Image (tube, rainbow, N blue to C red):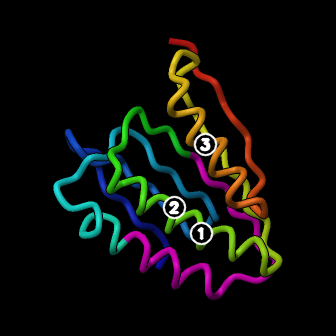
Amino acid sequence: METLHLPATSNTPEVAFDFAQGHLTLRGESYPESAAAFYGEILAKTGNWLDGLQGARVHVEVQLNYFNSSSTKMLFSLFDRLNQAAEEGNTVVLDWHHDVDDETILEFGLELAEDFPAIEFHAQPIES
């Protein structure tokens, strides 16, 4: 299980998870017809990979321009699992990219930082 790559579509984000390098990227928009179906494989593969980590560094980059409420639930599941890995002695760094004018996306990132304190959170503003 070296990589998981799903190209972006009009309603799903690009998923570029390089497990060997410990670099996980989500980029684009997320409003699939079934968020559970879309994120199911992502969550399963990521969880299996995280189960085998010890003292590793995980770098997560998220640049989502839009996501719906069902995607929000799946993102919380992903970050809950990453937070568990951090609590187990791994270093998890989250770069949360957001448009400087999009307070909603920034606020969601700040909520993640509050809800998952073991993850090192960095807000990364992007100029429009």
Dot 3: few (<14), some (14–19), or many (≥20) neighbours within 10 Å?
A: many
Q: Which residue is mark 2?
A: 76
| Residue furthest left as drawn | 33
Separation of marks 1 and 3 at Cα, in angstroms = 13 Å
Identify which amino acid the numbered label 2 is placed on: Phe
Q: Which residue is mark 1?
A: 80
Q: Residue at 42% of width from left, 80% of height from top?
A: 44
The crowd level at tag 1 (other Cα within 10 Å; few <14, some 14-19, many 20+) is some
Disc 3 marks which residue? 109
Q: Is residue 8 magenta?
A: no
Q: Amino acid at mark 3?
A: Gly
* Mark 1 vs 2: CB contact within 8 A: yes
Q: Earlier in the sequence, mark 1 or mark 3?
A: 1
* Label 2 to label 3: alpha-carbon separation: 11 Å
Query: Quadrant location of residue 127?
Result: top right
Residue 80 image offset from top left, x and y in percent: 59, 69
| 104 to the left or right of 38 | right
Whether residue 62 sits left or right of residue 84 in the image: it is left
* Image location (x, y in percent) of residue 108: 56, 41
Task: Indicate which disc residue 59 carries.
Answer: none
Task: Look at the image and give the residue range highlighted in magenta.
Answer: 42-61
Q: Secondary structure at mark 1?
A: helix
Instruction: Give coordinates of residue 113: x percent, y percent.
Output: 70, 50
In the picture, residue 65 is in which quadrant?
top left
